[in-house]
Image: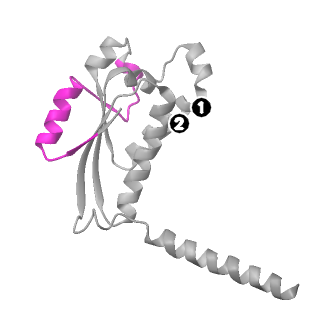
Amino acid sequence: MKSLFAKLIVSFFTLGIFFNIHAMQVNDSVALNGVKETKSVFLIDFTNVKKTAFYLNIIEGTHKGLVSQGVKPNMVLVFIGETVKYLSTKQDEAFEMENEESLESIQNSIKRLASLGVRMEVCAVATKVFNVDNNTIPKEMNIVADGFISLIGWQTQGHKLVPIF
């Protein structure tokens, strides 16, 4: 019985080491070979509040992942379309009650991303089309005249497009 117990302990210990070594090897070193800084512009166009909250968390993780791998991220997020509705600090009461967790997550992500130096732009064409008062957009975000023009400008300046929809 003791030897079976000892074998199990050794097996778990060995598996633990294997998984820790394996986890340590997971990185983006091939793609980031020689890269010291990145320039990216994320086109964000969602029609779902939960998906918006989810991907803002993912983008924050991407920023942290670059930093942890020794790369300086220069990120811009451009929000267009219906997504702008989910950025507003003023929501319809029923919608807010139904989506409280996602809306809170979005507002928290905006603050965290801003604190990391991520520039966030909100398309004024979209805020007009979706009846979002620009004054309800968080102060950490920048209202731009046209999200498409912004995307063209950032790409012309060398930022690589990351479309998320």
How far from the left and from the top, in percent, is residue 73? 29, 54
Q: Judge left or right: residue 100 versus residue 81.
A: right
With respect to residue 15, does 164 lie above or below?
above
How far from the left and from the top, in percent, is residue 22? 50, 72
Q: Amino acid at mark 1?
A: Glu
How far from the left and from the top, in percent, is residue 126? 30, 18
With respect to residue 58, does 27 lie above or below?
below
Q: Which residues are magenta?
A: 134-162
Residue at the disc numbered 2: 105
Measured Cα–Cα span from mark 2 to mark 1: 6 Å
Callouts 2 and 1 close, C-beta under 8 Å: yes
Residue shown at 33%/22% (left/top)? 81
> Is residue 133 magenta-colored?
no
Q: Judge left or right: residue 109 versus residue 19.
A: left
Residue shown at 41%/29% (left/top)? 138
Residue at the disc numbered 1: 101
- Residue 15, picture quadrant: bottom right
Residue shown at 69%/76% (left/top)? 12
Instruction: Name the quadrant of the N terminus.
Output: bottom right
| Protein image colouring | one colour
